């Protein structure tokens, strides 16, 4: 008999029983290098929770920070199929198919700390049906104080002007983002720099501070990979309130936003043509038309760029990465201007898509410099002030010629 004559049969009463196994894997297991974060809110870190068992399983999610005295505080846990628990650091995720993963976002706040300190975010995934089955992912966070100090700073070109405050935040897949900011002083001016990955050709439709709308100064993009925008508000309310940035639609990817307020800024605002650039190479730079007493503000964005380093004398006031995929760095800084044109530059840790914009701010005049000549009434000059002669020489350039009183009435 050959093999073709062999008849095989199976017993339909035989049932193969496969025991259910439980398994979970949470990643990342460390970031390799910590993500840099300034003090602020609405930060998030993405984790992936994978069902490594052979059955459909729901999982408990438990967040934690370390050490116990951490500068990190967990605010919430979100994601597709994720239900927030009774406390911010716990949640649950609906049944995940064998081999599938769910993206989970751990949202957190960063309190002020020591520059360079590293704390850790943890996320545990635990089988709801077999609590002994558990895995932990983690991500390191390094507290970063920008070179500018993140607070009050000088404007060396003018004795009457100064940087009042800076604040910043990161965001991911949002239609709008809010962050706190404070303004104070006189002759106030507010600039907001928005840096983001514009994968869907998204753009900003509006920015407000304390409910007051800002106006767009300039924007530039590198195709659909990096976009920056600068927005401004003259005489913003002197208050601690909220900056809100609104996009035309929900962003497909992530970004960084920062605000800087200044005192002693001329009411005419940015005094020079805004400059912007996108392109390639390990340096992104601009030559900004300027005068010696002005201040340059710049903001930059880079997709898959590993870092931005300000080229001296540029000072960065925020320099943040989103920690998403693709990663995006966004930064903002200032630099004292020089006569005619100021060179402003950032170096990149790796070459990829980037965009940069910059603008010069003009200070108000003050006793330490040449009096500002305009049609303003009751301007005061001091007898013997060496700048008085220069003032008289330029009166003809004013829209309205001021009346110069006799020497006896000069004060």
Image: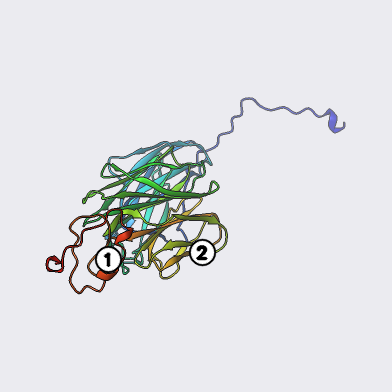
Q: Quadrant of residue 379?
A: bottom left
Which of the pair 211/48 is nearer the observer? 211
**Which residue, given by chain and number where applicable, does mark 2 sit on?**
349
Examine the rendering and report whether any part of residue 110 can be seen: no
Q: Residue at x 51, y 58 (%)?
A: 305
Q: Residues within 10 Å of mark 1 (few under 14, many from 20)?
A: few
In the rendered image, which quarter contains the N terminus?
top right
Q: Nearer the viewer, residue 52 or 86?
A: 86
Residue 298: quadrant of the picture: bottom left
Q: Position of residue 267 (x, y in %)?
A: 29, 53
Count neighbours of disc 2 (C-alpha within 10 A) and say few if under 14, some if 14 to 19, many if 20 or more. some
Q: Secondary structure at mark 2?
A: loop
Split into 4 quadrants, where in the image is the C terminus?
bottom left
Q: Which residue is mark 1?
A: 392
In this picture, residue 395 sits left or right of residue 346: left
- Residue 248 appears left or right of 189: right
Q: Are marks 1 and 2 in contact (CB under 8 Å)?
A: no
Of labels 1 and 2, the one closer to you: 1
Residue 332: image x %, image y %?
A: 39, 58
**Which residue, as the protein is rendered here, is positioned at the far left?**
408
Residue 400 in the image: state x and y as whole percent.
27, 53
Q: Nearer the viewer, residue 274 or 244?
A: 274
Q: Is residue 211 left or right of residue 317?
A: left
Number of numbered callouts drawn: 2
């Amino acid at each position: 008999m050959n093999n073709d004559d062999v008849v095989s049969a199976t017993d339909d009463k035989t049932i193969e029983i496969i025991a259910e196994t439980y398994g979970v894997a949470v990643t990342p297991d460390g970031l390799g290098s910590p993500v840099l974060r300034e003090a602020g809110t609405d930060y998030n870190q993405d984790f992936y929770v994978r069902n490594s068992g052979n059955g459909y399983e729901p999982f408990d999610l438990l967040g934690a920070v370390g050490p116990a005295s951490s500068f990190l505080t967990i605010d919430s846990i979100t994601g597709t199929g994720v239900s927030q628990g009774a406390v911010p650091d716990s949640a649950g995720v609906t049944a995940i198919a064998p081999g599938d993963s769910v993206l989970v976002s751990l949202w957190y706040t960063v309190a002020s700390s020591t520059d360079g300190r590293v704390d850790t975010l943890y996320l545990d995934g635990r089988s709801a049906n077999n609590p002994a089955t558990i895995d932990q992912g983690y991500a390191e966070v390094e507290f970063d104080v920008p070179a500018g100090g993140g607070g009050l700073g000088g404007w060396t070109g003018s004795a009457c002007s100064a940087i009042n405050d800076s604040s910043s935040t990161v965001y991911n897949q949002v239609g709008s983002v809010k962050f706190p900011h404070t303004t104070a002083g006189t002759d106030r001016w507010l600039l907001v720099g928005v840096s983001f990955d514009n994968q869907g050709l998204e753009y900003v439709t509006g920015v407000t501070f304390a409910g007051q709308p800002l106006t767009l100064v300039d924007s530039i993009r590198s195709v659909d990979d990096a976009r920056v925008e600068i927005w401004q508000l003259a005489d913003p309310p002197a208050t601690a309130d909220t900056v809100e940035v609104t996009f035309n639609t929900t962003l497909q990817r992530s970004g960084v936003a920062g605000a800087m307020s200044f005192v002693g800024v001329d009411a005419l605002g940015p005094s020079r043509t805004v400059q912007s650039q996108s392109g390639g190479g390990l340096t992104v730079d601009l030559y900004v038309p300027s005068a010696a007493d002005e201040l340059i503000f710049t903001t930059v964005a880079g997709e898959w760029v590993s870092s931005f380093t300000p080229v001296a004398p540029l000072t960065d006031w925020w320099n943040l990465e989103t920690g998403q995929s693709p990663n995006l760095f966004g930064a903002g800084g200032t630099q004292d201007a020089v006569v005619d044109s100021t060179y402003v530059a950032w170096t990149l840790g790796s070459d990829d898509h980037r965009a940069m914009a910059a603008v010069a701010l003009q200070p108000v005049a003050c006793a330490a410099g040449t009096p500002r000549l305009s049609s303003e009434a009751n301007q005061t000059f001091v007898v013997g002030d060496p700048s008085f002669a220069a003032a008289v020489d330029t009166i003809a350039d004013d829209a309205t010629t001021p009346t110069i009183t006799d020497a006896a009435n000069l004060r």
